[in-house]
Image (spheres, rainbow, N blue to C red):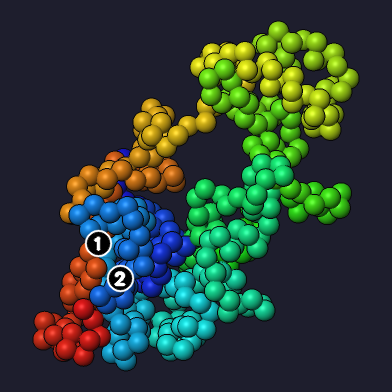
Amino acid sequence: MEKEKPLQDVVVLDLTRVLAGPYCSMILANLGAEVLKVERPGIGDDSRSFGPYKNGESAYFVSINRGKKSIAIDLKNEEGKKLIREFAAKADIVLENFRPGTMEKLGLSYEELSKVNPGIIYGAVSGFGHTGPYSRKPAYDVIAQSMSGIMSITGEPEGVPVRIGSSVGDIVGGMFLCIGVVSALYDRVSTGKGQKVDVAMLDGQIAVLENAIARYSLTGEIPGPLGSRHPSITPFEAFKSKDSWVVVACGNQEIWERFCRMANREDMLQDPDFATNDLRTENYKKIKPIIDGLIGQKTTAEWLEMLEANGIPASPINTIDRVVDDPHVKARRMIMNVLQPGMGELHVAGNPVKMSRMEDENVSGYAPGLGEHTDMLLKSYLGYDDDRIKVLRDKRAVY
């Protein structure tokens, strides 16, 4: 198998921090890009101060920034700004997730950087995007989740608003940014032109509302939280077993009929209220207690054996320790080891993009120390020597 990765010749100048932007650059790094992570001198990426820690190193930071190179540049220093322009002239992609207007104030906007590199792909991810009345408002993941409506359909009926357990506002924004910049790279192949990619976390959350908008448009009813239940398919949710929980997903009529026969409940096939998926969903309050009573008679392991033997999609609700030890997850190499200096071995999520001509790795590159590659990058990309780098340090442009 070839070891080459599809983006191995792509250089990314990454000015982002915390999650949305770094998540994007991590995907690009997984696909072979060289990511030059620009960090604030003395402080670095904010996520370096997020726990848990081992020997003063942040596991949060490592999990999102492995395989990148760190250079510490002061973006408020005129010499530091000059360095950014010089690196941008050599890069394929520039990423930033500052509040809109910040890069313009620094003189490092797309308009300015495209003057030194007309082919630059400028990827920006922010809470609300670079246009619109909310553009300059600050935002975090929970703001994107709440404003998009996704929190209004998450949780138990009549329950309190619930944030999704992972930071999907940031993560989805980072994924859409990655899609955007890779698409812009492809466009550049034929046009020779760079462009700006503007992604908003709020837009991303609206885009993944699935059919909630269509349901509201069609019925006029405002969707609400349904727990683990699917709004349009029944039965399709988690049920309490004798000892824990089991998810049963009867995604079509054939699966439903197999479920009834497997459970020796052919009588449900004769009930006109359950004849079709639409009727089962309409009569949810009638069918739910029947299946609750049925599932509660056996353990999760017993149900999984029966359900899987009959080709009925089913699953336990795994805790994270079970996910990490799952044989299929391991076989897909979705748990990777990072040999992190100062921390030792750390498990992180692997690369979900599997490609036939790209080697799937077991061990990831480590996350860089703050400014670890400053000298090396200044020399290799910009041709600076030790004396010139010392001048930059004396001027506090780099650290």
Nearer-N-terminus badge (2/1)? 2
Instruction: Please tell me which residue is depicted at 53% across the width and 20% down the height of the picture.
Output: 243
Q: Which type of secondary structure does the marked residue at label 1 adopt?
A: loop
- Residue drawn at point x = 47 percent, y = 83 percent: 102
In percent of width and height, residue 219 lies at 87, 49
Label 1 Cα crowd, 10 Å radius (few <14 / some 14-19 / many 20+): many
Q: Is residue 343 above or below residue 385?
A: above
Do callouts 2 and 1 mark residues in contact (Cβ within 8 Å)?
Answer: no
218 shown above or below 178: above
Q: Is residue 201 left or right of residue 283?
A: left
Residue located 66% across and 41% down the image: 156
Residue 189 in picture, x, y percent from top left: 48, 67
Q: Which residue is mark 1?
A: 368
Q: Residue 94: which quarter of the image?
A: bottom left
Q: Disc 2 to disc 1, how far (Cα)? A: 11 Å
Q: Residues within 10 Å of mark 2 (few under 14, many from 20)?
A: many
Q: Is residue 313 visible?
A: no
- Please provide percent x and percent y for residue 345: 22, 44
- The answer to which quarter of the image holds residue 29 is bottom left
Q: Is residue 111 left or right of residue 333?
A: right
Mark in the foreground, 2 or 1: 2
Residue shown at 78% from the left, 24% from the top: 287
Which kind of residue does numbered mark 1 sit on? Pro
Pick the residue in front: 243 or 61: 243
Q: Nearer the viewer, residue 4 or 267?
A: 267
Helix, strand or loop at mark 2: loop
Could you say which quadrant of the image residue 269 lies in?
A: top right
Q: Can residue 325 be seen in the rendering of this structure?
A: yes
Image position of 178 (left or right of 380): right
Please, is residue 61 above or below residue 198 in the view?
above
According to the picture, the residue beneath numbered tag 2 turns out to be 44
Residue found farthest to the top: 264
